[in-house]
Image: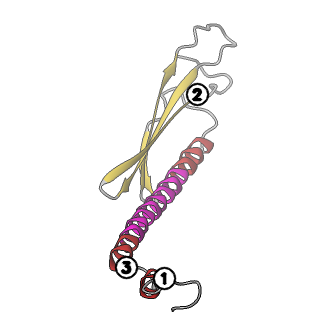
Amino acid sequence: MTGPSCKPGQGRAAARRQGGFSLLELLVAFSIMAMSLGLLYRVAGGSLRSVSDVSQHQQATWLAESLLASRQVVRADGWNESGESGGYNWQVRSSPYPTGLNGPKAIPLHEIQIEISWPMGARTGRLQAVTLLPEQKPPPGSTVR
């Protein structure tokens, strides 16, 4: 690489500089790439777990909605029931809800507490919901205790 623009002795140094990456540069590049891939793997794994958690929580929500849809009113003695459905354990408990209203037209209310739990690997997923439902009116002609 000697020519009119190169001084004698500079041809080899210029050729060596243009030759490619050194071993140290390759090691640094591979280290950065390995750390980046490890981080991407962790993020992707966390996202997959998160999607699974959201899906299970959505199914638990549908179960709670289904349980509530099965009743329009609550009997005077309350609603206390539990069971298992599709790997989800559920429990429904009710208690009279004080409204402060009295009189023949006041409809008593019950506070409904629904708790749903399911296994999520080493931990347990849990959904709790609280709502109010009216008490069932007694049939006409019956006495109210």
Amino acid at pointer 1: Gln
Q: Is residue 136 left or right of residue 20?
A: right
Which color scheme did the rendering employ for the protein?
secondary structure
**Which residue is denoted by mark 3 in the rendering?**
22
Q: Crowdedness of circle 3 by 10 Å Cα count: few (<14), some, many (20+)?
A: few
Secondary structure state at the residue bearing disc 2 = strand
Q: Is residue 76 left or right of residue 46?
A: right
Amino acid at pointer 2: Leu
Q: Is residue 45 left or right of residue 76?
A: left
**Cβ–Cβ under 8 Å for marks 1 and 3:** no
Q: Is residue 82 magenta?
A: no
Cα–Cα gap, marks 3 and 2 = 73 Å
Secondary structure state at the residue bearing disc 3 = loop
**Which residue is denoted by mark 2 in the rendering?**
132
**Which residue is denoted by mark 1 in the rendering?**
18
Q: Nearer the viewer, residue 94 or 136?
A: 94
Q: Residue at horizontal 67%, vertical 11%? A: 104
Amino acid at pointer 3: Ser
Q: Please say if 144 is above or below 13.
A: above
